[in-house]
Image: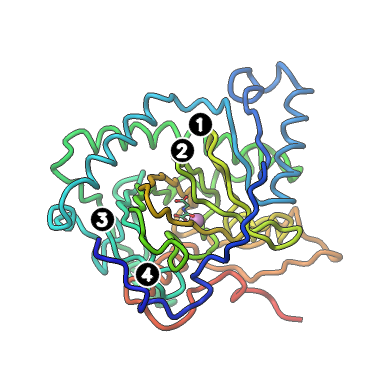
Amino acid sequence: MGDFDPAFIQDTEHRPKPAVIEADGIPKIDLSPYITSSPNTNTAAIHNLVDQIRDACKNWGFFQVINHGVPIESREKIQLAAKRFFDQSTEEKRKVKRSERNPFGYSDTEHTKNVRDWKEVFDFTVNAPAVMPASCEPDDEETAEYDNPWPQYPPELREVCEEYAKHVQKLSYKLLALISLSLNLPEDRFEPFFKDHGSYARLSHYPPCLAPDLALGVGRHKDGGALTILAQDDVGGLEVKRKSDRKWIFVKPTPNAFIINVGDVIQVWSNDAYESVEHRVRVNSTKERFSIPFFMNPAHYTMVEPLAELTNEQNPAKYKAYNRGKFFVARKYSNFKKLDVENLQIYHFKKTG
Ligand code: OGA
Ligand code: NI
């Protein structure tokens, strides 16, 4: 990446304000009752776990999990391979760069809110080939398939990414089941939406930035999918907007834990019972940082709308149904083109009156 040029920042929202609170912050949840024992053997512990998930989703939209069942070796392997990939020259990395059409591969020009993020990424679908709408035109029913443009170097990248994704995907289904229970729904209520899921993972690298108060690794945003399962390293930089007072809270790294957040799709399914919360990434002046978010997404053809069981006359559906694939493609397209319009957001589908 080039030298930092503060001139490209016009949006002052993209600049972190200094008064960030370092607190224990988001809840830490021990998943062992659900991961290591079969669900029916320890019902009191499961009830307690579901209560913790409900509180965390309501009060924070974010939580960390420990004893999650993802082997530490798999995480170490992907972290090492990611470092080897990003250590190459820009020219080498751009051989697998993302294009206007294929959303997977390398990119160092991502934008949040039309401002360049101080990061580089490699995105890969975990359900290859990924199927999605060919365009964001509402009447265009054509779909297209995309494969991952795996690089030649490091040679193990593909295998370690696929293995890691398999483990995290398993965890994501368990989390989804717990969230479903926490909304008083059957454990498998969300499963059908994920039959042809469109989940993808991202290797993110945040190089040191000489002007850390003028840039952000990722500007403030909400995640558009169902759930995000994030592995961050020990450098830290993720900040979450606390719901109670709208202050930015630094998420202290916990070794080997995952950070989970509810995305826009769960906000809509739950009819706003759980909110998709804003977050951003601060950069560091001396240390580089790596993180790996896994974005769990329903199938592209899913029409996302509040679940019938969670709405009634007193609590009518707050959203009109929207197509998940079109939503994704519209966002990718405006990011790619750096269009001078606000990204598509779920509140654009809010019902009025
Ligand atoms: C994201 C994100 C956080 C991080 O990519 O959507 O919020 O710590 N990443 O990298
Ligand atoms: Ni995010």
Residue at (52%, 59%) from the top-left corner? Answer: 280
Q: What residue type is labelled 4?
A: Arg
Sequence order check, earlier mark of 4 and 1: 4
Observer-side mark, 3 or 2, equals 2
Residue linked to disc 1: 255
Secondary structure beneath label 2: loop
Q: In this view, does 277 lie to the left or right of 323?
A: right
Secondary structure beneath label 4: strand
Residue linked to disc 4: 116
Report, in whole angstroms, how far the alpha carbon at label 2 lies from the one at label 1: 7 Å
Q: Position of residue 35 (x, y in %)?
A: 59, 24
Residue linked to disc 3: 106
Sequence order check, earlier mark of 4 and 2: 4
User: Is the Cβ of the residue at disc 4 closer than 8 Å to that at disc 1?
Assistant: no
Give residue 167's quadrant in the image. Answer: top left
What label sits on residue 234 in the rendered view?
Answer: 2
Q: What residue type is labelled 3?
A: Tyr
Q: In this view, does 301 lie above or below 231?
A: below
Q: In this view, does 58 lie to the left or right of 205?
A: right
Q: Which amino acid does label 1 sit on?
A: Pro
